[in-house]
Image (tube, grey):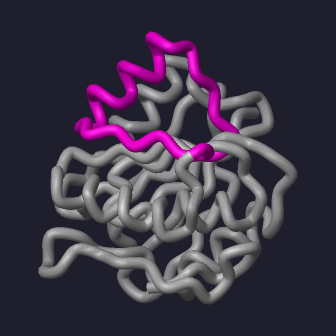
Amino acid sequence: MRIVAGKHRSRVLKTLEGADTRPTSDKVKEAVFSKIGPYFEGGIILDLFSGSGNIALEAISRGFEKAIMADKAKKAVEIIKGNVALLKEEAKCEIWLADYKKALSICQKQQLKFDLIYLDPPYQLALINELVDKISKYDLLQKKGIIVCESLEKEDIRVEKPYLIEKQASYGTVKVTYIRKE
């Protein structure tokens, strides 16, 4: 797994061994950033289910000014910290040992607003609708921000106002859904 573009282009990141995490492929990552960017002048990303920090570090490499990465697994948080240190981006990154409920609650309490929220939960949990509902309830997305969700192709994703599904794209069994405010 590597950083695809930006100032850290081609840098190789570490990932967890085994089947507990499923890093976003370079193909999907490039498609996502081509759609939403591809380069940025600032912005804040929330990367829930961060795994290795792959998505958030790609965003930092492409110009985001801050990343919050949350994962409930201690081993994942150790990998994320190692990858952040490898790229020398500690000043731009917050890493939380927290499940999604705790992470979203912290964001609400701190009244954080994000330009990009990346949701890539374990596919079998089918959490996307619950996550988008909480993000809406807690008002965590900037006015022109975007939520990007990775799920199984067959997962039925629905949103309610003020959100709308801008686009969905399939990559084999994986579906990427782009959600914005109306």
Q: Residue at x 79, y 37 (%)?
A: 144
Which stretch did the figure color magenta? 91-116
Residue 171 counted in the magenta span: no
Front residue of 102/95: it is 95
Rendered image quadrant of residue 178: bottom right
Q: Report the side of 138 relative to 34 (left or right).
A: left
Q: Residue at x 54, y 31 (%)?
A: 160
Q: Does the image show residue 54? A: yes
Q: Report the side of 110 relative to 16 (left or right).
A: right
Residue 96 counted in the magenta span: yes
The x and y percentages for residue 57 are: 56, 63
Quarter of the picture holding the C terminus: top right
Residue at the right extreme of this rendering? 41
Quarter of the picture holding the N terminus: bottom left
Rendered image quadrant of residue 3: bottom right
Front residue of 132/155: it is 132
Q: Residue at x 46, y 61 (%)?
A: 85
Indicate whether 48 appears above or below 10.
above
Indicate whether 87 appears above or below 10.
above
The x and y percentages for residue 140 are: 57, 26
Front residue of 110/79: it is 79
Q: Residue at x 64, y 43 (%)?
A: 66
The x and y percentages for residue 100 are: 30, 37
Q: Report the side of 37 relative to 3 (left or right).
A: right
Q: Does the image show residue 155? A: no
Indicate whether 141 appears above or below 164.
above
The x and y percentages for residue 42 are: 80, 46
